Amino acid sequence: MKERLRYEYRQIRKDIQSCAREAADGAIADAVLAAFADKQSFFVYFSYGSEADTHALVSRLVALGKSVYLPRVEGKDMVAVAWTGGEDMKKSSMGICEPEGRAFEGSADVVITPLLAVNPSGYRLGYGGGFYDRYFCSHGGIKVGIGYSVQFTDENFQDGTDVPLDMFISERGITYFGK
């Protein structure tokens, strides 16, 4: 079932028109900055393909003097690497740009995650590698999924290894889960 949903939500996300996508990305970035203005450190995925764009968000966080960390996959785990905008990046085996440099051992205040879909219980449908779920289990921070409102679904796809998000931010606002 998860593979079918992954395919469907990739298609849904790809079909968003570029002008609507640009406006939605701006609204998402504005909502993140407003919701977490008092937070100092952010672990943010560096968007790829049709994911909600984080490049402008990362730049704005750096300009505000926030500590920003980007993910890098190391084997079966994901680590956070400090980012100020000038560090070297390299493409991973999956074609995703990742930062070079030493891994950060601490936890960020806010962890911004990509997703294909999210349900009302806060479970995110990711790409199937489990990297974020494993990261959540070993690091603190507010777990925030960002994406487009069309990625919110009533589907129940979670399993025993999935870790729920604390909130989902889309162009339509913030949805809080549980707490």
Image (cartoon, rainbow, N blue to C red):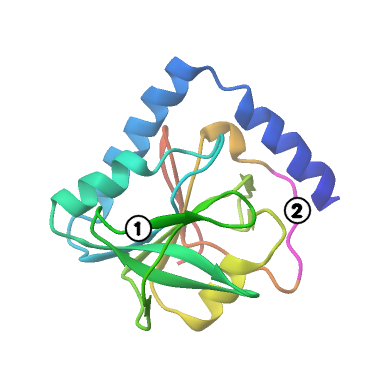
Amino acid tagged 1: Asp
Magenta-highlighted residues: 154-159
Side of 2 relative to 99 (left or right):
right
Q: Position of residue 1 (x, y in %)?
A: 86, 50
Q: Earlier in the sequence, mark 2 or mark 1?
A: 1
Secondary structure, mark 1, is loop
Is 82 drawn above or below residue 170 in the view shown?
Answer: below
- In front: 79, or 179? 79
Residue shown at 70% from the left, 44% from the top: 154
Reply yes or no: does residue 158 show up in magenta: yes
Residue that label 1 marks = 88
Amino acid tagged 2: Asn
Q: Position of residue 118 (x, y in %)?
A: 61, 49
Residue that label 2 marks = 156
- In front: 107, or 167? 107
Residue shown at 37% from the left, 38% from the top: 28
